[in-house]
Image (cartoon, rainbow, N blue to C red):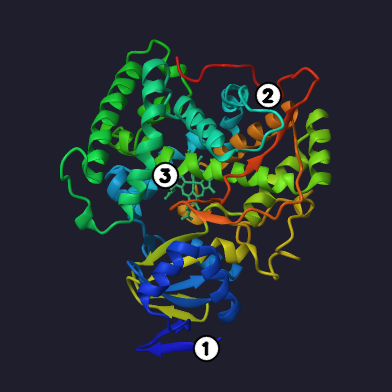
Amino acid sequence: MGEATTNSVRLPQGPRIPKAAMGIAFLTARHRAVATVGKRYGSTFTLKLPIFGETVVISDPVLIKDLFTMSSDLVGRASNLGTVLGPGSTFSLDGAEHRARRKLLVPPFHGKRMAGYEAIVEEEVMRETETWPEGREFETLQPMMRITLNAILRTVFGAQGTSFDELRKMFPPMVPLASRMAVMPAAVRRDLGPWSPWGRVQRYRRRYDEIIAELISEARSDPAFEERNDVLALMLQARYEDGSPISDGHIADELLTLLAAGHETTATTLAWAVERLRRHPRLLSRLTAEVDAGESELLQATIWEVQRTRPVVEATIRVTRDRIRLGEWVIPKDHAIIASITMAHNLEQNFADPKAFKPDRFLGTNPDTHTWIPYGGGIRRCIGASFANMEMNVTLRTMLREFELGTTYAAGERHHSRGVATAPSRGGRAVVYRRKAGSKSTTRSGSERVSA
Ligand code: HEM
């Protein structure tokens, strides 16, 4: 690997493609662009990108570990999502403020609490799959989007009744519009009336804030407030070290963040799971037998392997707050570093036969946190990882219990970038047949309401 050295800075080499051309390649064929450059330059290289400028791309586990464990005084968040999610969003916070917020958010999302949400997810899967057609191919991405949206609204927002109905209608048009605006230059984010894109985002946001204010006031006046276990109620009860609560405005920003970060990512992973399972008939029969036997080890390994081979977030970005050393490289202040999730998952040194879809590789072992990184890592690691894993597990096991999934010899679906997440290009198409044996819930806890 060659390097460029100037004034004690030592950066890896990379293609001399102009920023704009690389930007177009990234927007239109991110997956292929990274794979092509990686093939030529190895696991570490420099890319010139619009917005971020010169960017170091890493995937080697030693460098990934160094980056993820580096102090937040040295590397911080590089994301413009905060501009649309608001100043109280985790995506807008850095350093001490971010650490303090994480302390309050980690307990509500702790793995041990997740079993309490399983019954709600199963109800949403049953509601959505009730109308699935038999013997006719259909896309599963939109159904998965409805399942994960409704699950978050009920378990995280504690929404029910009219607020649940209004929010589940509002988000499908609002979230894609807002995420498109997040990646536009600031000049485009101007309210030019109710029909302009930013004007529409602002209008949605005003109505969203009104609904959240109602949910907050209902929660506070709920006689069972203390016993509730939806994330909104837990955030309202949480206190920073100085005894102060999270302000209502910040709670509204944070709920929107949890929804934006958690709904599409989980749904696209589920659509990929369907896409992979249809093409692996032997695995599918083993999984069905396992679910019928009330076990889950192979299903967990399958979820991990779907995330390894089809990570829906392909990279995570940090920016240096100071000049840093990363392995043999010396990277200047204010420089972007991309940890490429796709490349890390495809390194031969990390996974034998990396292109092959082989869930068995994870049987009897947990994935390593610096080679298997679909949720990123360190202080910025995805807060909703246990939540997403629980949702995917309940959705897939309920599907396998209720349906026989038609298999296919068709070529795998290609990668389609939806902005933040990468989805199967044909929406994870499935053919299903209802299983005749009466269905029996595989959820451990009974159906309990999370909110009052
Ligand atoms: C399969 C589903 C999901 C995937 C693949 C995923 C992936 C990621 C990734 C790659 C990051 C960036 C981590 C980093 O920079 O190191 C992230 C951050 C985050 N995710 Fe997820 N996520 C998923 C589901 C969820 C869910 C269900 C929620 C919440 C309900 C959630 C909430 C968040 C939040 C709040 C952050 C920001 C954390 C911070 O900056 O401190 N995610 N996620």
Residue 69, relative to residue 62: is it above or below?
Answer: above
Q: Which of marks 3 and 2 is nearer the N terminus?
A: 3
Mark 1 crowd level (few <14, some 14–19, many ≥20, 10 Å Cα): few
Instruction: Give me the C-alpha separation between circle 3 and circle 2.
Output: 29 Å
Compute the Cα span from label 2 to label 1.
54 Å
Disc nearest the viewer among 1 and 3: 1
Which quarter shows the C terminus? top left
Q: Which residue matches tag 2?
A: 443
Sequence-wise, which precedes: disc 2 or disc 1? 1
The local crowd at label 3, few if under 14, some if 14 to 19, many if 20 or more residues have their Cα within 10 Å, is some
Q: Residue at x 51, y 29 (%)?
A: 151
Determine the secondary structure under disc 2: loop
The kind of residue on which mark 3 rests is: Arg
Q: Tell whether 431 sits left or right of 98.
A: right
Mark 3 lies on residue: 102
> Residue 204, located in which quarter of the rendered image?
top left
Ligand 1 neighbours mark 1 (CB distance < 8 Å):
no
- Please state which of the two labelled residues, at mark 3 or mark 2, is closer to the viewer: 2
Residue 120 seen from this side: yes
What residue is shown at x 43% (from left), y 18% (from top)? 160
User: What residue sits 32% from the left and 70% below the top?
Assistant: 334
Could you say whether the residue bearing mark 3 is in a helix, strand or loop? helix
Where is mark 1, residue-wise? Answer: 2
